[in-house]
Image: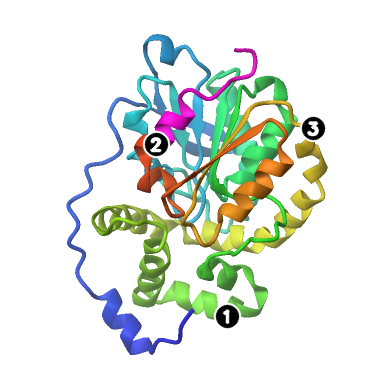
Amino acid sequence: MKRIALGALVALAALPVTAAADAGPPKGFVERHVLFEGHRLSVHDYPGRGAAGRQPPLVLMHGFPDSVRLYDQLIPRLQGRRIVAFDFLGWGDSDKPRGHTYTFDEQERELDAVVRSLRLGGIVPVAHDASGPPAINWSLGHRDQVAGLVLLNTFYSAMPTTNPPEAIRLFSDPAYNALTEAIGENEEVNRWLFRWQVGKFMSSPVTRKRVLRVLWRQFRAAQPAFASLNRDLTPAVAADTARTGELNGFDRPVRIVFGGRDPYLNPGMARSFHELFPTSDLFLLPARHYVQVDAPARVAELIQPMPLAGA
């Protein structure tokens, strides 16, 4: 990150937000609460209709620092498909227990709790960003329940072109714990950093304002989960790197859809995934990191007709 004087950070953070009022998530879902180890996970269950509604449900998962609201532009374009979108513990509208340790292994168990509680049977996990490790590991352990797997600008193991966002590098390095704690306690600098980093994930200035407004409001309460998951990031990637051989034996259809203009989880990583999953196909779109925000219509086109196991 370039050096910027603290006074400049505060001045930028104080700029008014001019985006329109939040209209809320796409309509038509049943609000459910799934019990997970004594806490509640917030789930938006879109029932689906017609032939599309009879296909395996799409289970949409978010990364950090966001929530299921990242899929607001995509969900209406999925043409009657049953969709289950949920916030991981500590994020969005899910419970945020105080003093909790959030991990990627725990998120895998949360996905399992949602699938079991809603009796979904076969599903298509859709992973973006930090939900890649829980989605992939759950899929490896539940192949009979995986009709297909979708990867959207995500990560899993050590890859040659991995380029973590600046804020993730900062918060995942224990050497900067004192600094990141100070950032978290300074509302104005914290908001500037969020808007600077997450703003780089989208192409359209108009869309960027609207999405940043929604995600920042939710992120304020999710910062303990963000900090905890960043502490778990390096150990989780190391553990998953040791499992990459299992990806070579994964026999379910895998669709890799990456924003080709993402400098962080980039096209090189998409190609690495393509090499690791023998049943995968690869699509690079003219989009940045939030590919489901930059190119929702094209992402919907690619998710809907993907080949499914047993089809």
Look at mark 1 in the image and give the residue it sits on.
Answer: 178
> Disc 3 vs disc 2: which is toward the camera?
2
Query: Where residue 249 is drawn, which disc sits there?
Result: 3
- Of labels 3 and 2, earlier in sequence is 3
Under circle 2, the secondary element is helix
> Which residue shows up at 70% across the image and 39% down it?
137
Q: Residue at x 65, y 34 (%)?
A: 280
Q: Is residue 7 left or right of residue 159?
A: left
Q: Which of 173/92 is in front?
A: 173
Q: Residues within 10 Å of mark 2 (few under 14, many from 20)?
A: some
Task: Identify the residue at horizontal 73%, vertical 42% (top origin).
Answer: 276
x and y percentages locating residue 42 in the rendered image: 44, 37
**Which is more foreground, mark 3 or mark 1?**
3
Q: Amino acid at mark 3?
A: Gly
Label 1 CA crowd tier, 10 Å (few <14, some 14–19, many 20+): few
The residue lying at 43 percent from left, 36 percent from top is 299
Where does the magenta region start and end? 298-311
